[in-house]
Amino acid sequence: MNLRVVYCNHETAGLEIRERLAFSSEERLRAAYVHLNARFPKTEIVIVSTCNRVELYFGAEDRGVLPSQEQIAGFLAEFHQIPLDDFINELRTETEIEAVRHLFRVASSLDSMVLGEAQIVAQIKDAYQRGADCDAVGPLTHQLFQAAMNFAGKVRTETKLSEGRISIASVAVGEFGKSIFERFDDKTVLILGAGEMAEETLRYLKDEGVSQIIIANRNQERGQQLADNWGGRWIPFSEWESRLSDVQVIVSATGATEPIITKQRFAELRRAKSSQQTLFILDLGAPRDFAPEIARCDDNVFLYDIDDLEQTCQQNRKARAREIDKAEKMLEAATSQFMHDFYHRKTGPVVQQLRETWHEIGRQELDRLFRKMEHVDDNDRQLIEQTINRIVNKLLHPPLENIKQHSKEGTPHTLLETMKQLFGLGDGLNH
């Protein structure tokens, strides 16, 4: 198998690097395929580009045409107009069985920051389809991605990895938020700050149908960008208190060194607006943005800080951890089975033709012998045929065992070519 994946390490690479390397639009992705198809015309290609990862998969029948990590890095630098030194240390590469294991791990979310997330397999499926639409997918990548998606489904149905939310944002919305509100599509959300944590929470809220979004941020450019990205509107940070009675959900992650509002000030604002509507506050600040005492202002204020959220996350992680070993064993079994099936398809034609060729030679020699020995009865003929077949099978055993042993580590291209030349096998076999 000639397979390579080059990817940006999402655990160490910062968001800025991942964003700069991402293929952020349909137009850019199609342009990338055009460039890659022209640069590596005999190579199969699938690009996986999400908010968390950038991965490029390459497959080829001929090992010599498979691009190196250096060539792929050069393409990324040229295509994105980024100096190579800015990201080269964040690239990782896997080949052959390790590349298969990597994709299986990614598709099943074992490699995700949110263990058990269902979104990634949909992204993998979408990446495969886009590659196919751009005429970049071939037999190898087709088999690989289909197997990866099948494995992801098996993990989802046979383990409990997807049970219990384990990210701060998913717990905030999915467990705490839904215990307060039955629906979110009729709620107005106020975002204080514009950091990653607030944006991730906003993503979950949008999935729940939120459409009314107000972004209050000191940096107008960053705040306006976040508002544009999520269909909201930006206001100066100094105005957020005046919107308190207009919103039902507040998500705060300002990075302030002390609370931005005290219990006394909060109570004054609630009284001034005569507002007793239910208010759900997610304080994601560390240290806190909202004074803890605010939770006791009235019965309609629900304040959760990052400690509350993290405690629930940890409980869910522990529950899932028991399933990780099971999923890892499934991963190893699925990877081994894929490699076995793939190599069997590659070596099978050679093995089959070798068997057929030698047994056909045996049959021809037996026919010649029996024509000269017409006096031999049926019982003796059968004994002679069995003897010849045993001889052929014993002669076949060493080369076939060699193929079997070498196939455990990969398709034995050189050995197969040598055997075809030594034994005069046809050139019409699959390589």
Image (tube, rainbow, N blue to C red):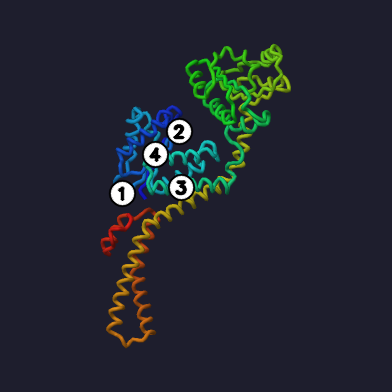
Residue 62: mark: 1
What is the secondary structure assignment of the residue under circle 1? loop
Reply above or below: 365 against 147: below
Tell me if 401 is positioned left or right of 290 in this view.
Answer: left
Q: Residue furthest front?
A: 133
Q: Position of residue 377 (x, y in %)?
A: 36, 86
Q: Earlier in the sequence, mark 1 or mark 4?
A: 4
Mark 4 lies on residue: 56
Q: Residues within 10 Å of mark 4 (few under 14, many from 20)?
A: some
Separation of disc 3 and disc 2 at Cα?
29 Å
Q: Residue at x 68, y 28 (%)?
A: 180
- Is residue 89 in view? yes
Q: Nearer the viewer, residue 243 or 93?
A: 243
Q: Are marks 3 and 4 in contact (CB under 8 Å)?
A: no
Q: Tell which tag, 3 or 4, sits nearer the viewer.
A: 3
Q: Tell which tag, 3 or 1, sits nearer the viewer.
A: 3
Amino acid bearing label 2: Thr
Q: Earlier in the sequence, mark 3 or mark 2?
A: 2
Separation of disc 4 and disc 2 at Cα?
18 Å
Separation of disc 3 and disc 1 at Cα?
22 Å
Amino acid bearing label 3: Gln
Residue 372: mark: none
Mark 3 lies on residue: 146
Residue 12: mark: 2
Q: Quadrant of residue 380?
A: bottom left
Reply above or below: 29 against 96: above
Amino acid bearing label 4: Leu
